Amino acid sequence: MKISISEIIALTIKNRLGTVFNGPAVPSRGIIFVLLSLSLISCGSRVSDSKNNKVDKVDSNEVSASLFNGKNLDGWYTYLRAPEPTSEVKGLKKEGNKYVEPLGLNKDPLNVFSVVREEGEPAIRISGEVLGVLITEKEFENFHLSLEFKWGEEKYPPRKDKKRDSGVMYYSTGKEGAKAGAWMRSMEMQVQEGDTGDMWCIDSTSTRVRTVKVAIDGAEHFRYDPQATFNIVNMRGERYCQKSRNFEKEYGEWNRLDIYAYERESIHLVNGQKNMHLTDIGQIINGEIEPLTKGKIQLQSEGAEIFYRDITIQPIQSLPHIE
């Protein structure tokens, strides 16, 4: 099920005013008043406050809807793969010291996903103890997704001694656990220390990116370069592309992520700076690349504690021009 502009307006009113928009039940003047009020509220909440380490937002005239109500995880569901042997989960099947079945849908005995207050404001805490995802119940298309993240302290196997890692995946489709027993087929905006904004094709997705070849960790990989020629990125060859530049802030600070996705294109921004542009987004089905233009949103649990807040989504009528 995809979400329409009217549903986004309804969701916004429900989250901010506590009522549901039902079309004819609200007079036309009432609609205008509500939209103007929401615009003012949105603008008022987007002023930078250095004392509270707030992050400036990207300006927009569209109505935005909150995907996180600050109280619970309504509108989301979870999927977790089998835990690592270091975790204790009573009743989950083991062979030797290894768990052999996933926790699965909406089973979170280790409280991997929770709502907390961080620096006095509501946030979604993802512990990272088990690999998995927090997934929106609805699909989205032609949108601007904006959210903020900050790293926590905890780290867990199998990434105990590696960079802190998470990710925001969009255009998510198909079955949960399709890749690595944890992720849905999707496009991923990497959230990883020093690598935020990188792109991964998860499972059988595909895209084209302007790239150059660079040496990364002893091997050649793609790097986004807006002046370069297009290359295909998917499971048939290289399914990873490094961002053009690193715009992530120091550990302990909040960072803003923006994803603009319109039809088969998307742009990644980190703290207001563009560092990735994808075109011809698709998925490989029966050997052919078919268009992929909508899907759910996933937030990754991948071995590191992370906090997400201020998660909003807006409809867009075209992909903005961003240098």
Image: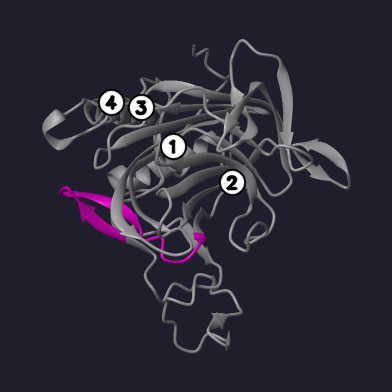
Q: Judge by depth and name the residue closer to the eye, 244 or 102.
A: 244
Which mark sits nearer the N-terminus, 4 or 2? 4
Q: Is residue 166 magenta?
A: no
Single out the mark in the foreground, 4 or 2.
Answer: 4
Q: Of the numbered discs in the image, which one, if any, rests on residue 9?
A: 1
Q: Looking at the picture, which amino acid does disc 4 mark? A: Asp
Question: What is the C-alpha distance between the residues marked 1 and 3?
Answer: 26 Å
Q: Looking at the picture, which amino acid does disc 2 mark? A: Glu
Residue of label 3:
271
Single out the mark in the foreground, 1 or 3.
Answer: 3
Displayed quadrant of residue 207: top right
Single out the mark in the foreground, 4 or 1.
Answer: 4
Q: Looking at the picture, which amino acid does disc 1 mark? A: Ile
Q: Of the numbered discs in the image, which one, if any, rests on residue 56?
A: 4
Which mark sits nearer the N-terminus, 2 or 1? 1
Which mark sits nearer the N-terminus, 4 or 3? 4
Q: Which residues make up the magenta segment? A: 115-132
Which mark sits nearer the N-terminus, 4 or 1? 1
Single out the mark in the foreground, 4 or 3.
Answer: 3
Q: Position of residue 277 (x, y in %)?
A: 58, 23
Which mark sits nearer the N-terminus, 1 or 3? 1
Which mark sits nearer the N-terminus, 3 or 2? 2
Single out the mark in the foreground, 2 or 1.
Answer: 2
Q: Judge by depth and name the residue closer to the eye, 136 or 133.
A: 133
The residue at 50%/40% (across/down) is: 190
Tell me which secondary structure the magenta stretch mostly adopts. Answer: strand
Mark 4: secondary structure: loop
Residue of label 2:
139
Against 89, residue 182 (above or below) is above
Question: What is the C-alpha distance between the residues marked 4 and 1?
Answer: 23 Å
Mark 1: secondary structure: helix
Q: Judge by depth and name the residue closer to the eye, 163 or 252.
A: 163
